Amino acid sequence: MGNIPVLDRRFSDFSPTGFRLGLFHVQPSLDTSISYTSNALQASSNEQSDKILTAVAGMTASANFGRSNISIDGNVEQIKYQDISDLDRTNFRGEINLDYDLSSTSSLKFQLTKDRIHETRFENPVEQDVFEPIQVDEHGFLTTLILRPAHTQWAFTAGYNDISYRNTKLVSTNAISVQDDRDHSVYSGGVKVSYERFGDKYKQRLVPFLGLNIAKSSYERNGFDTGTGDYTGTKKDSVNYNVIAGIDIKPTGKLRGVASIGYGSDRPDDDRLETQDDMVVNIDLSYLYSPLTNFTFNINRFFAGNNGASSMALETQLSGKIVHELTRQWVLNAGLDYIHTKFSNDLTDTSLSGNIGFDYRMNKTFAIGGDIRYIDRESDRANGDYDETRAMIRLKTNF
């Protein structure tokens, strides 16, 4: 039990069993929650509170066919506001994963995804006014070939994503905010080589690796020019490179996770746009302080999505979380999150949030959870500052 994280432990009294459907093992779920927000529009003044009802229906299905495994995972999320119905939205997510063992030293993985989300204020780096949530549709695939010659492992990846945006309306004026100039496709490829023999010498199983990732973003049209009312703005196609070195810490001791550091570059095709070069970091670590208390630490620095006017933004994320199992039924948690975003035009956004929460396992089917979070955001953009308090209670149902 000492080397199993609190949230990964399973107790027969509280673990849903699911059911068989042909060759598949199926586990449906239904989560419902009611939330309170002190600032539904994330406004810097004239804050408006609201209550939010959320329902998420999900399902996972998995099957084993000897040398291959297949899993299907998906959910539909409905979000309803009591007063500000313009913020109502429906999201969904679907994913199919297929793993196939080609031989004892090679395997092939294939992932197919289809998602619909809605961007709300400040998740969208283009529009500064309050707007109705922007529908974002995305589909794509990722293929991974893994080879294990001798004491090394080579992982080759190739992927494609198509991302499209729907135009939205500004809440204050009902004016149309053009977003479909952000429609684009991303073609990606990469290689990661790990030296596994190094890890065999240590009980902690430290496995060093090197990686290279390349992504090409291709936009369907030029940016929308508000002056002419036409798509005559800047073409935002770009190529992004990441070269990294790091270490995987396998889950055999108290410390596990991954840590890497490297160099990233985002190079727009249009010479009028600014090239960005900077350090990229990815540190995701868990420390099992005791069988009942775990800590997680995350530091991520990467080039985020195109900001609509120039090249990508450089985003730095820091977070820490503590999870404590008070009893087999009660699990407590608390966390802090910091996000700093720097755009190529030297504007910056900074947000700091903290939360405390709990989960209470009732039986195999039901669990209750709650969370209180405070968010404070500072921005160089006009009307970009705000603070918000959120409180949520939810019922988790697993079958």
Image (spheres, helix red, strand yellow):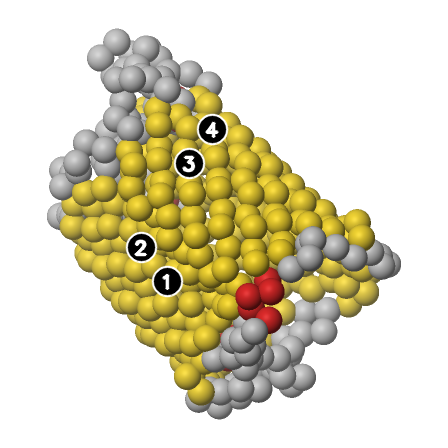
- How many numbered discs? 4
Residue 150 place in picture, x, y as percent = 69, 57
**Residue 53 visible somewhere in the drawing:** no
Alpha carbon separation for disc pair 3 and 4:
9 Å
**Residue 112 circle label:** none
**Residue 216 circle label:** 4
Q: Which residue is mark 3?
A: 241
Relative to 271, is 141 on the left or the right?
A: right
Q: Which residue is mark 2?
A: 317
**Marks 2,4: beta carbons within 8 A:** no
**Residue 287 visible somewhere in the drawing:** yes
Packing grade of label 1 (10 A; few <14, some 14-19, many >=20) is some
**Marks 1,2: beta carbons within 8 A:** yes
Sequence-earlier tag: 2 or 4: 4
Whether 285 is drawn above or below 94: the answer is below
Alpha carbon separation for disc pair 1 and 3:
22 Å
Residue 342 place in picture, x, y as percent = 23, 42
Q: Nearer the viewer, mark 2 or mark 4?
A: 4
Alpha carbon separation for disc pair 2 and 3:
20 Å
Q: Nearer the viewer, mark 3 or mark 4?
A: 3
User: Please, what is the three-letter code of the amino acid marked with disc 2?
Assistant: Gln
Residue drawn at x 65%, y 77% is 15
Q: Nearer the viewer, mark 2 or mark 3?
A: 3
Alpha carbon separation for disc pair 1 and 4:
27 Å
